[in-house]
Image (cartoon, rainbow, N blue to C red):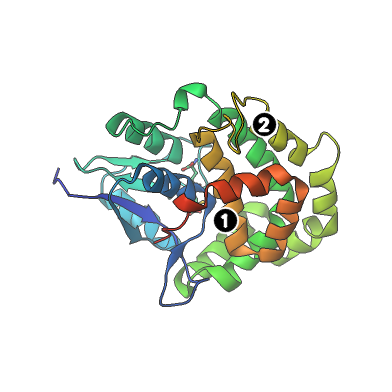
């Protein structure tokens, strides 16, 4: 294995900030990028279009994802550590980075990322449809757009526009806001473990679980502003947490 000075992050490019400024958008890669930015670990981004992920990562010797753990056999985020080791899947990556660079810690031992991931995914699959439909149009480069639209349509059995029409809009936001529903569940898990005052799930200390939630907030903001405003409107905790993490969202490329 060849050593390299910096970690390499294989991330999916967005053109939503302009064709000449490719930037990160997708919620899973954002989890890893937040960790790298927070820990101030030197890294380079290798933009990898959706159709290029599998051939590139396969050629680098990465074993495929365990069935059911990702959208495809090969996924972003994947990183190449400085010793040449390739690590795929955001939870494996944060575990490796915590071992390699323990300070400042992201408190994986508090084990909040599991319940927060569950609550984030519970909310995501209610509110995601309008943002999802906008991704091939306003976010992805031409190379990824048709791959993404066709792949997701095959997976869901219908077009992204039809998903937005049937599952998106007002009824999605009503379902998200129902008492005891997905937004309440996420708010609960983001607040009930606080050890002291502060915007984070642990209170004043940021932990990896916060980055799981903020990955979603940042992704929705970058894909579909109207959905982002509605998402933030579901609970004040969400906006407070997102704003508290802005320093680690600044580097997006
Ligand atoms: N559980 C994985 C999920 C990764 C995942 O599914 N990433 C998506 C992008 S957000 C992906 O790379 N999809 C590839 C594809 O759809 O072909 C993780 O946390 O890293």
In this rendering, position of residue 66 left or right of residue 55 = right
Is residue 77 visible in the rendered image? The answer is no
Q: Position of residue 150 (x, y in %)?
A: 58, 64
Residue farthest bottom in this picture: 19
Which of the two residues, 214 or 204, is positioned nearer the viewer here? 204
User: For residue 138, what is the image quadrant?
Assistant: bottom right
How dense is the environment of label 1, judged by Cα within 10 Å: few (below 14), some, or many (20 and up)?
Answer: many
How dense is the environment of label 2, judged by Cα within 10 Å: few (below 14), some, or many (20 and up)?
Answer: some
In this rendering, position of residue 184 left or right of residue 242 = right
Q: Disc 2 to disc 1, how far (Cα)?
A: 22 Å
Residue at disc 1, secondary structure:
helix
Q: Quick check: 187 above or below 162?
A: above
Q: Position of residue 112 (x, y in %)?
A: 56, 28
- Label placed on residue 58: none
Q: Residue at x 61, y 39 (%)?
A: 199
Q: Earlier in the sequence, mark 2 or mark 1?
A: 2
User: For residue 165, what is the image quadrant?
Assistant: bottom right
Q: Residue at x 23, y 50 (%)?
A: 6
Which of the two residues, 201 or 180, is positioned nearer the viewer here? 201
Point out the frontmost of discs 2 and 1: 2
Q: Which residue is mark 2?
A: 191
Q: Which residue is mark 1?
A: 219
Is residue 183 visible in the rendered image? The answer is yes
Q: Position of residue 53 (x, y in %)?
A: 39, 56
Q: Residue at x 80, y 37 (%)?
A: 181
Residue farthest left in this picture: 2
Q: Quick check: 73 above or below 190?
A: below
Query: Which quadrant, please, contains the N terminus?
Result: top left
């Amino acid at each position: 294995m060849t050593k390299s000075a910096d970690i390499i992050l294989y991330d999916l490019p967005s053109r939503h900030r302009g064709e000449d400024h490719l930037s990160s958008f997708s919620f899973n890669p954002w989890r890893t990028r937040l960790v790298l930015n927070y820990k101030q670990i030197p890294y380079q981004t290798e933009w990898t279009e959706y159709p290029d992920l599998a051939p590139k990562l396969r050629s680098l010797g990465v074993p495929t994802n365990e069935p059911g753990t990702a959208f495809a056999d090969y996924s972003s985020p994947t990183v190449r550590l400085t010793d040449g080791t390739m690590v795929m899947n955001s939870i494996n990556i944060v575990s490796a980075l915590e071992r390699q660079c323990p300070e400042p810690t992201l408190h994986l031992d508090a084990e909040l990322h599991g319940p927060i991931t569950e609550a984030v995914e519970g909310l995501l699959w209610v509110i995601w449809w309008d943002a999802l439909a906008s991704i091939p149009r306003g976010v992805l480069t031409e190379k990824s757009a048709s791959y993404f639209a066709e792949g997701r349509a095959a997976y869901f059995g219908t077009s992204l526009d039809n998903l937005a029409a049937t599952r998106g809009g007002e009824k999605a936001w009503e379902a998200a806001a129902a008492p005891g529903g997905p937004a309440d569940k996420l708010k609960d898990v983001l607040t009930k473990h606080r050890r002291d005052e502060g915007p984070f799930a642990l209170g004043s200390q940021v932990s990896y679980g916060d980055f799981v939630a903020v990955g979603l907030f940042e992704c929705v903001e970058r894909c579909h502003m109207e959905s982002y405003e509605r998402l933030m409107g579901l609970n004040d905790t969400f906006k407070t947490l997102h704003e508290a993490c802005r320093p680690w969202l600044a580097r997006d490329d």
